[in-house]
């Protein structure tokens, strides 16, 4: 792809992002006019987070994706970036890498510390789409996309495809769009993403795909929205602040607090790289512990046996 085409793509992405912003504001106005609850402070906090993120995004790719240019120099093949099928391969490859990045972002605290920002709104609406972390780019999130460099895609093309993937995800942050029939389970839809943003134990750690849900189906993390379980949005322990700086760093602060209290290297590593909610005495708030306490198996399905019998090692509810 020529430098002119890349800069055209970048301009188009900025234009579409501004349109998305306008659409989120319009959604808020319409919902308010319909006299339904709309939390404007939450949305303005998301807007503030988004504005600073644009500034932080200037971190160059050689820092955000260390080794990316070296791998590209030593690439396996050279797909022609002016051919449509190269972009199709890049899109699918990116989706695969995104699945594993996003899964790690929910299951490894180091990555969760950044990603929790996106899950912090207690309401689900279009403005939540652009509440994205400031620290992901400097804490290794893009390392998951390095295989694409080795496959022959230059880092700027990968970054552009990633931006397009995130842009797709804008519209799926709508509570008012119903289930979409045969598309469910294949494409990432508002219904599937409502499940992803839910804090209910039955819905935790599900639907990691960006555009597609095929990798969730393949790797066992797809959960459909249920008629009998309306999602409760936000974090398991809800974040009650509209301060953008606190939103951006609350989870990193929690990591720092836990590290200060850690007795030895094993505990420190657990706090850094264990699942969110991990605690050294086994009394933490991991998804598995919360499910055991609720009488569910590790994947969120009801246990046949009595719930109380099936929760060994879980002794208290913690924070
Ligand atoms: Zn997520
Ligand atoms: Zn989301």
Image: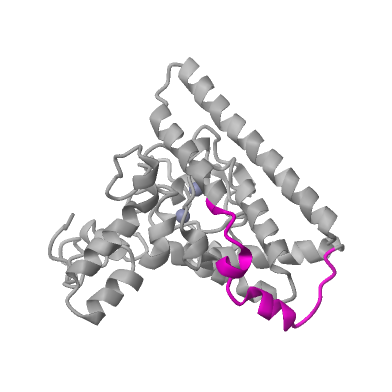
Instruction: Inspect this view and state whether residue 99 appears.
Output: yes
Instruction: Tell me the magenta residue range.
Output: 56-81
Q: Position of residue 121 (x, y in %)?
A: 39, 41
Q: Is residue 140 left or right of residue 69?
A: left
Q: Is residue 40 left or right of residue 180?
A: left
Magenta stretch encompasses residue 107? no
State the quadrant of the C terminus.
bottom left
Q: Residue sitting at 53 percent across and 62 percent down?
A: 216
Q: Position of residue 145 (x, y in %)?
A: 60, 69
Q: Nearer the viewer, residue 32 or 202?
A: 32
Q: Nearer the viewer, residue 225 or 19?
A: 19
Q: Residue furthest left?
A: 315
Q: Is residue 307 left or right of residue 182?
A: left
State the quadrant of the N terminus.
bottom right
Q: Residue sitting at 29 percent across and 45 percent down?
A: 238
Within the image, what quadrant is residue 110 found in? bottom left
Magenta stretch encompasses residue 72? yes
Q: Position of residue 42 (x, y in %)?
A: 40, 34
Q: Residue sitting at 42 percent across and 27 percent down?
A: 40
Instruction: Inspect this view and state whether residue 291 appears.
Output: no
């Amino acid at each position: 792809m020529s430098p002119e085409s890349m800069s055209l793509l970048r301009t188009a992405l900025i234009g579409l992002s501004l349109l998305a912003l306008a659409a989120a504001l319009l959604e808020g106005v319409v919902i308010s006019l319909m006299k339904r609850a709309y939390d404007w402070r939450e949305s303005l906090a998301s807007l503030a987070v988004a504005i600073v993120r644009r500034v932080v995004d200037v971190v160059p790719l050689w820092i955000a994706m260390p080794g990316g240019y070296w791998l590209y120099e030593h690439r396996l093949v050279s797909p022609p970036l002016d051919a449509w099928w190269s972009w199709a391969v890049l899109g699918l490859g990116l989706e695969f890498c995104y699945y594993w990045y996003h899964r790690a972002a929910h299951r490894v605290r180091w990555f969760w510390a950044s990603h929790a920002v996106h899950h912090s709104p207690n309401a689900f609406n279009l403005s939540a789409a652009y509440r994205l972390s400031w620290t992901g780019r400097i804490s290794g999130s893009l390392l998951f996309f390095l295989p694409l460099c080795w496959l022959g895609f230059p880092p700027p093309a990968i970054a552009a495809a990633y931006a397009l993937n995130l842009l797709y995800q804008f519209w799926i942050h709508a509570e008012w769009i119903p289930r979409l029939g045969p598309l469910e389970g294949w494409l990432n839809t508002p219904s599937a993403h409502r499940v992803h943003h839910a804090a209910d134990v039955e819905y935790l750690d599900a639907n990691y795909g960006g555009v597609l849900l095929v990798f969730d189906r393949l790797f066992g993390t797809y959960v459909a929205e249920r008629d009998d379980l309306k999602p409760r949005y936000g974090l398991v322990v809800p974040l009650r602040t509209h301060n953008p700086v606190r939103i951006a760093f609350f989870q990193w602060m929690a990591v720092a607090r836990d590290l200060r209290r850690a007795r030895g290297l094993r505990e420190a590593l657990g706090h850094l790289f264990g699942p969110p909610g991990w605690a050294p005495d086994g009394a933490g708030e991991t998804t598995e512990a919360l499910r055991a306490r609720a009488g569910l198996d590790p994947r969120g399905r009801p246990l046949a046996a009595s719930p109380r019998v099936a929760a060994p090692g879980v002794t208290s509810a913690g924070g």
